[in-house]
Image: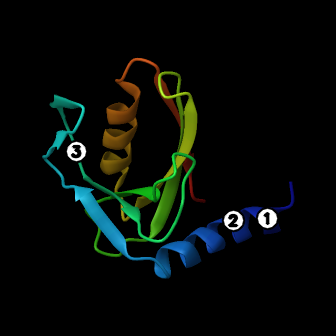
Amino acid sequence: MPERFNDEFWSYLDQLVEKSQIVIDNPKGSAHPDDDTEVYPLDYGYLAGTTSSDGAGIDVWIGERADRRVVAIICTVDLIKRDTEIKILLGCTEQNMQQVVEFLNKDQGVRSFFVRRQ
């Protein structure tokens, strides 16, 4: 695949994030609404005014870096909800990215694929 399309993909994601309000509805340390034993390792929310496959806003994870730059995406497959989604990682360190991958993959029926920005 031409490199240009890869570069444009990340540029489009940057534009989407820059033009959207970030809403944090699950702060770091809060319990998951469906399972209070699951605790969010980072701030988790969505981009207001966007739409994902589940009809809600596009999901974002916010890391510890102040820049909130798009550093990666995670694609998920949920056999229970029978859907797929993309989640955007913003300002995440290497450790933050690992925390998100581990958090998403510990649920039965959910698996994720991590794509790092080059």
Extreme front residue here?
A: 55
Which quadrant is the N terminus positioned in? bottom right
First-in-chain label (2 vs 3): 2
- Would you identify the image quadrant in which residue 3 lies? bottom right
Q: Give how far across and how far down residue 36 sits, in percent.
A: 14, 31
Element on which disc 3 rests: loop
- Would you identify the image quadrant in which residue 90 lies? bottom left
Element on which disc 2 rests: helix
Residue 114 seen by the camera: no
Q: Disc 1 marks which residue?
A: 5
Q: Disc 2 marks which residue?
A: 9
Q: Is residue 69 left or right of residue 16?
A: left
Q: Badges 2 and 3: C-beta atoms under 8 Å apart?
A: no
Dot 3 crowding, Cα within 10 Å, few <14, some 14–19, many 20+:
many
First-in-chain label (1 vs 3): 1
- Would you identify the image quadrant in which residue 48 lies? bottom left
- Amino acid found under the numbered disc labelled 1: Phe
Q: Is residue 103 left or right of residue 31?
A: right
Q: Is residue 18 left or right of residue 84?
A: left
Q: Give how far across and how far down residue 49 sits, in percent.
A: 48, 71
Residue 41: mark in rendering = 3
